[in-house]
Amino acid sequence: MNVPRYKLDNSQRGSESGSTKLYLRNRRGSMLEAEIDVNSLDGKAKSDNRYWYAKHAAMERNKNFRRIRLSASSREAVDSCFDHFIPLEEGEAVQESEEEDVESKESVVGTSWEDEVLNKTREFNRQTRERPHDEKAWLAFADFQDKVSSMQSQKGVRLQTLEKKISILEKAFELNPDSEELLLALLKAYRSRDSADVLISRWEKALMQNSSSYKLWREFLRVVQGEFSRFKVSEVRKMYSYAIQALFSACSKRHRQMDATSEPLDSALIQQELVLVDMLVSLCRFEWQAGYRELATALFQAEMEYSIFSPSLLLSEQSKLRLFEHFWSSNGARVGEEGAFGWSLWLEKEEEHRQKMLKEESSDDNDVGGWTGWTEKLSDRKEDSSIASANTGEGDVNREGLDEEMEDENGMPEDDTEAMLKLLGIDVDAAASDEVKDTLTWVKWFEEEVSRDQNQWMPTRKAGELSSVDEMGEREDEEQLSSLVLYEDINGYLFSLRSNEARLSLVYQFVDFFGANISPWTSSNSLWWIEKINSLETLSDSMLENLRNVHECLSKSDSANGFSLGSLLGSNSDISMRTEMMKFLRNAILLCLNVFPRNYILEEAVLVAEELFVTNMKTCEVATTPCQALAKRLLKSDRQDLLLCGVYAQREAASGNMKHARRIFDMALTSICGLPKELQDNSPLLYLWYAESEVANSSGSSRETESSSRAMHILCYLGSGLAYVPYTSQPSSMQILRARQGFREKLKKIQSLWSHGVTDDQSAALVCSAALFEELTNDLSGAVEILEHMFSSVLPGRRSQSHQLEILFNYYVRMLQRHQDDLTLSKLWNPISEGMQLYPLSPELYQALIDICNHRMTSHRLRMMFDDYSRKTPSVVVWLFALSYELSRGGSLHRIRGLFERALAQDTLNSSVILWRCYIAYEIDIAHNPSAARRIYFRAINACPWSKKLWLDGFGKLSTVLTAKEMSDLQEVMRDKELNIRTDIYEILLLQG
C-alpha cells in the first residue's frame, strides 16, 4: 500500500467544534510488533518504515526532506495514547488547521533533517555553556549524537559522529572529574571505537584513579567477562581479587578516619561494606556459573567464618589471616558441615586441647625422673638407628620388586585401553577433533557432566575424600585436586566486616544463593537485586511461582494452547542435590542463629529448609509438619521468642494444620504481657500473621464467616491494646469501635516516625493490620484511605529504597486484587502505575498488572505498557513477564522472536544468560527451528562465555544440528576458556565399549 501510517497521538478535542487533529504515528512502536519505527531526531522526524512504499521511505531519508510540524491546540487535552482509530472528521480538521496556519506560516513550511540537527546542537551548546556542571545536559548532548548517527547511511559519517560524541564526553568529564555517570558514559563510548586491549587499558587507568567506586568495578568486570576474545576464568578471577581488595582498602581507610569505638557506625561505611559483600557474592556466582562450584561454596564458608565467627581478639588483618590459615588447613568442620561450631569456638576448643596435652606431657616427664634417662636414650637411639638402617635396606629391595610388579600391572590396562579404543574405531594418536564420530557419545557426555555438576558442589578436604561417589570409576589426580580448596585459593578474597547490616546481608545472600525460600530483606531497587536478576541462569523459585501464576491466569481466559515460560528451561535441580543443599543450609542457618538470635527471617528460612530436607528424604507422607521437631527444639531453647512461634504457626497453617496453628498463636499472644518491652514491640507482626492466616483459611460461606470473625477478634486486641484472650465469639460493636480509635492513635505516631525516614517491620505490620481491620469491619475504601495516607507521609525517594514500604505496597495491591471485580479500572490502574514508578523491578507488581489488566484491557494496550516499561527501565524482569504473556496466549512466532531480539539488543541485557537460554529453548521446543537455535546458540556463547550451563545447552538441545566435530571443538574452546570440565570423553567411550 502506498499509504502513510498515521496514529492519533496526544490529540486535543475542542469542546466547541469537537474536531480532532491528525498526528503522525507515535515514534514508539509497540514492543510486540514486528515492524518498529526508529526514533531519529527526538521524535521530530520519522526515519524508518513511516511509509509502506519503498519509494516514499527513501524520500524521507533525504536530508532536504522537510517535515511539517503540527502543534497541538490550546484547548483541553484528552489523553488518547491508547486510542485505536482515527475519527474521519476531515472537514473540521481542515478548517481548524486553516485557522492555526495564520499563527505561524513557518511551521507549515517545516524543517529539514539538517535544520533539526543544527537547532538541537545550538540548543545543547547553549545549555552546556550556561550550566557546565549539569551532568544531565552533557549526557543528553551525547545521547543526541546516537540519534544523529542512526540517521547516517555511510559508515565514515557514523564514525565522525562517534568521535564527536567522545569529544563531548571528554570535555564534560574534564569539567566534572568526580562524575561517575560521565566517566561510565565515556568508557562506554570508547568501547564502540577502541580495540579490546586499548579499552581495558583505559578502564585500568580509570580504576586506578577511582578505586573505591563499586559502579566502575562492576561495569569493568562486566566488560571483561563479556569480551570473548580475551576471556579466561583465571583473568576474571584476578580482576575480582583486585576489586575486592580495592573496596576493602577504602572501607579500612574510612574506618581508620573514624573513632574505632564509635557506635553506631557511619552510614557511608555501612554502605561501603554492603557493596563489598555484593562484590563477593558476584564472585561466588561467577565461579558457580563457570563450573567451579566447590570454590564458590568455599568462598562463602570462608568469608562467613572470617567475618561472622571470628574470635574477639584485637589482631591486625595480617595476624588474623595467619590465624585463619591454621583453622582452614585443619580438619575442623566449617559452616554448613556436620559438627561445625564456628571459627571462634573451634579456636577455644583447640586451646583447651593444647593446654590439656601440655599438662599430660608435663606429668609424664615428672614420672620418668632425671638425667640418666638421657644416657639410656642415647644408647637406645644408636641401636634403633642400626635396626632402622637394616630395615630400610630390606624395604628398598622389597620396594624395587613391588615397583616392577606395579609397572607390569599398570601396563596391562593401558594396552587394554588402547585396544578397546581401536575396536571402537578411535585412533589415540589422532587429532582431538577426530576422536568422537558420533554425536550420541557427546550427548551421554553432556548427561554425565550435568550429573557431576549437580553432585559435586561441596569442597573436599583431602585427596580421595570426595563429597560424592564417582560412578565412572577413578578420576585423574588433577580432577581430584580440583575439588580441594586450599587456603591459597581463598585468602585473596577475605575481608573483615564491622557492621551488623553487612554481616546480615552476607548471611541472607548466602541463604538465597543456595536456593532456600527467604522473606524479602531488601528493596527490589537495591544493587543486590539488580545484579541477581541480571545474572540469572535459571528461574528462581519465587520468580517461577510468579510466572506460573501468570500462566494460570491467562490459561483460564484464553482458549489458545499456550506455553509456560518456566517449562522452557525445565527443572535442573536434582532431588539428591536439593536434599543435600537443604541439609547444608539448615546446619549453616542454625549456626548463624547463635550470632543473630531471634531473627525471624533466618528462623523462617531454617524451617523451610528443614521441610524440604525432610520431605525429600521421606518417600511416604507423614502426619506431622516436617519442620515440627526442629521448631519445638528451637522453642525449647528460647521460650520467649515470639516471632519464632509466629513463624512456626505459619508453617503449620500452610500445611493445613490450622487448629494446631491457632493453639501456637494463642499461646504466644497470651504470654506477651509477661515479656520485656523490647519483645512486646514485636507483637504487631504476630497479630498480623495470625489474622492473615485466618483470612487465607477462609473457603466456603460458613468458613469465610468464621474466619473473618476470628480475624476481626485478633485485630481488635491489637488496636485496643488490651491483653489478648482466645476467640470465643464474634467481637462486639464496642470492641470494634475501641479498636478503631486505638489504630488511629497508633497510626499518628507511626506517621510522625515515617516522615523522618524511620521505618521498621513492626510499624509496617501495624499499618497492614489497621488496613485489614478496616477491610473486614467497614469496607475497602477505608483500608485504601489508610494505606494511601500513610504512603503520602514518606518522600518518594525514601519509599523506593525501603523494603518495608515495598512489602506494604505489595500488600495494598493484593488487597485490590481481592476486590477487583467490584472496582473500576481507574481505581485499579492508578496504584499499579504508581507502584511501577517506585518499584520498576518488582515481579509481584508485574504479576498483578497482568492479572488486573487481562480482563479489562485489550492485548494491544497491555503490550504498549510493557513497551513503555521496557524503554524506561530495561530489565530482565519486564522482558520475562512480556514473554510469559505472549507464550501463555500462544502468540505468533514473529512477535515472540521480535521480543527476544529487542531484549537482547539492549546493552544491559545482552549478557543475560537466562534470556539467551529461553530463546534457544523456544526455537527448539516451540518454534521447532533447530537451525535458528544453532545460530542463536553461537551468538549466546559469544556474549556470555563464562556460563557453563549455556555452553552445555549446545550438547543437550542442539545434538541434531551440531556435528561431532563441532561438539568436540566446543569442548576444546571450553577448556581454553578455563571452564571447569569434570568428565573426560574417554570415560564415556570406555563405558560404551
Image (cartoon, helix red, strand yellow):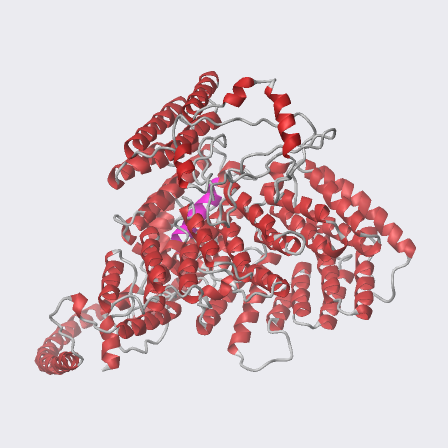
Relative to 883, residue 37 above or below: above
Q: Is residue 672 visible?
A: yes
- Based on the displayed image, in which of its 4 quarters is residue 685 positioned? bottom right
Residue 90 on image: x %, y %: 63, 34
Front position in the image: 15 or 671: 15
Image check: 874 left or right of 81?
left
Relative to 328, residue 495 above or below: above
Residue range of the region highlighted in magenta in the rendering: 272-284
Residue 696 on image: x %, y %: 72, 64
Q: Magenta part mainly helix, strand or loop?
A: helix
Relative to 306, residue 8 above or below: above
Q: Confirm whether the magenta stretch covers residue 447.
A: no
Please count the marks in the image: 0
Front position in the image: 598 or 480: 480
Q: Quadrant of the C terminus?
A: bottom left
Q: Residue at x 28, y 70 (%)?
A: 983
- Based on the displayed image, in which of its 4 quarters is residue 601 positioned? bottom right
Image check: 821 left or right of 335?
right
Residue 849 on image: x %, y %: 62, 52
Q: Confirm whether the magenta stretch covers residue 278.
A: yes
Q: Residue at x 37, y 23 (%)?
A: 171
Front position in the image: 692 or 629: 692
